Image (cartoon, rainbow, N blue to C red):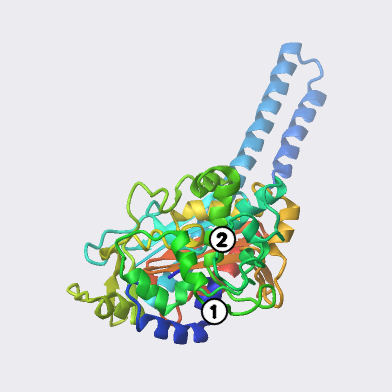
Amino acid sequence: MFADDYVLDMRANRCVRALSVLLSVAIVAAACGGSAGEAEIIADAETADLIAPSTTVAETEAAETTAVTAEQDVAEDIEDDQVVDAGDQRAALIDQITDVLSDWQAAGELPAVSLSVRMPDGEPINIALGVRDLQTEVPVTTEDYFRIGSITKPMTAAVVLQLVDEGLIELDAAVESYLPGWLEGYEYADEITIRQLLNHTNGLVEYALSPSFYALAGQRSDVAITPGEIREWLAAQQPLFAPGTDYQYETGGFLTLGDIIESVTGNSAAAEMRTRIFEPAGAENIYLTPEEFPPTSVVNGYGRAQMYLAGTALIGREDTDALTILDEPVIDLLGQPQEVLQSAGWTGGGNEAQLESVSAIMRAMFDGTILSDEQIAEMTAPTLDVNYGLGIDSSEIDGVRVYSHGGGVPGFRSQGNYLPDFDISWAVSTNLIPLPEGASVSDLREALNPVLVAAVG
């Protein structure tokens, strides 16, 4: 239900097989220079003084005033030209970004895409293409909300790292010391640490890709599910490995981190995320469900392929809309009960946002606004033999260092990125899952990153 970039892109073949099995029983399942002109004016003024040395004081002052005024005019012209140049460059960059996004949308016939880019000047470039609803064909706008899924994880990790610095959490302390009985009856309940929740070396099963969990959730899709209920399910599963010995992406650990945040602060996880992450980043339009919700609903989210089967036959829902993408049927997943979908992710994948807020947060987490250099180094250090650190992936892609995290939930596929060597962030979301071949977020990243890097020079 909530899957990371590792699951949806980097291990695509493996996940297609896993998703096929999963969805067979599922219920619900981003200078002009002026030196020559100035020299001419100065020369004219000096020549005037030599030719007419008897000039009165008033005339001399007038000449000097004229020269100064002329110099100011030239300086203003230079500044105006520089502004025009900067404006032209920005307009050209927007055109390039729009072309890349349009090609990506066309390749997958994606209903809607929303992208926000922040270059080193910090000013957002926001672009939205397509429609938010295939039936009404209402155009999507940059003010529409999308479900960004697991991009929530690095935000949760950033809150935890702040609490570590404040002495409220220890990375290598046992989870049991903060939440006694958190995995009652589980073999390694006493051994799993906070760090192992953050870097996915805890050995817990990924509930978001488990057929049995989907069956459980599908039976009560109109009733919100709690982190405690999810941990009860996790406690009954067999460990994948002993804590700290291997890596396997999962989401239950990040739900547990939400409970720990609340336990040590006495505040809701949503309140802590807003004051520690959203507000410092200037991100006004992002909400951690199910504690808070956007003022308007997210755009309609669509499922194709296996997700179409999960949204129709497997839950007994008749497809009366006859919607298609790439000549394949799709189902509008917003037409189903949303309570489980808006509660199962929480601090592991529950944020709903405008993409401008997401790009702001991806930048603020790594430019010194939210985390210190030491915290960033801790967060981005690799785990075992993978690039994933504490809630973030740190990779070199075509020679460019990228901090990133993906998000996939029923109806939505998203991606958040920060290029630390160029101070560029961008975030995208589209309302279709799974993405068709040739239109993955990796395809978009491979096309977009070079354009952004070249613009910085």
Q: Is residue 31 visible?
A: no
**Lateral position of residue 120 relative to residue 23, left or right:** right
Which of 232 and 257 lies nearest the eye of the viewer? 232
Q: Position of residue 435 (x, y in %)?
A: 42, 76
Q: Position of residue 410 (x, y in %)?
A: 38, 69
Q: Is residue 9 visible?
A: yes
> In this picture, is 360 found above or below 302?
above
Residue at x 46% of width, y 65% of height:
230
- Circle 1: element type: loop
Q: Position of residue 191 (x, y in %)?
A: 67, 67
- Circle 2: element type: loop
Residue farthest along the front direction in this orientation? 185
**For discs 1 and 2, the disc positioned in front in the rendered view:** 2
Look at mark 2 in the image and give the residue it sits on. 181
Residue at x 46% of width, y 72% of height:
208
**Lateral position of residue 232 relative to residue 305, left or right:** right
